[in-house]
Image (cartoon, rainbow, N blue to C red):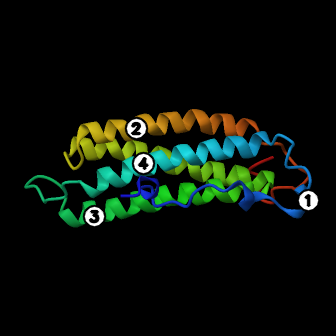
Amino acid sequence: MDFDKLSHLPEWNDDDFRDEEEEGESWKPNPTREACKALYLQWQQVMIMLNGALDSMNSEEKEDGFPAAYWEDHKAMLLGDGYQVAVKIRSSEVGLYTIRMENASIIRKNAQFIKSAMLTMMAEEVIDDEHGEVIREEIDKFRLLFREWVSTFQKDEYEDEWGLFI
């Protein structure tokens, strides 16, 4: 079994984010990209845990609970949100401040939703408490890296037409 593929996410490759303008400047430190890479690698860990917990979830219909189809839909929604976090992390490296801020907002919302969903799934005994707690702890580690990453953003000359990220 290839444990590197358990997250179902592509591996981080620094060369994917180099452009012609950076030619010859690869030696210079890039704190935003380094923080972005650390964030992405941590999210891979969250996704490994999430995939494992959701693959082993107990979605049998209970007399006083939600129907099994509800939990299958919930699983799909959580995985979709998780994969979107990875996409938004990687696509934030386009370098524009407003794109980074927009992506950061979506990332935060999805990570918070997944973390809180674990509480519901544990309370309804759909996933094991141990699985839910590990996922929540990994998201807490992710949150700390997220804060570091966002602190590296530098406002540029482009204006946010919606006036949100000014």
> The disc labelled 1 sits on which kind of residue?
Glu
Q: Residue 127, position in %: x, y? A: 24, 47
How far apart in space, not on screen, are marks 1 and 4 (Cα)? 37 Å
- Residue 108, compared with residue 66, is above or below; it is above
How far apart in space, not on screen, are marks 1 and 2 (Cα)? 39 Å
Q: Nearer the viewer, mark 4 or mark 2?
A: 2
Residue under pointer 3: 72
Marked residue nearer the N-terminal end (4 or 2): 4
Q: Nearer the viewer, mark 1 or mark 2?
A: 1
Residue under pointer 1: 21
- Residue 76, compared with residue 64, is above or below; it is below
Of residues 104 and 48, the one drawn nearer to the viewer in this rendering: 48
- Residue 91, compared with residue 38, is above or below; it is below
Q: Residue at x 80, y 58 (%)?
A: 18
Q: Residue at x 19, y 45 (%)?
A: 125
> The disc labelled 2 sits on which kind of residue?
Arg
Q: Residue 102, position in %: x, y? A: 68, 54
Marked residue nearer the N-terminal end (3 or 4): 3
Q: Residue 163, position in %: x, y? A: 78, 53
Which mark, residue 136? 2
How far apart in space, not on screen, are marks 1 and 3 (Cα)? 46 Å
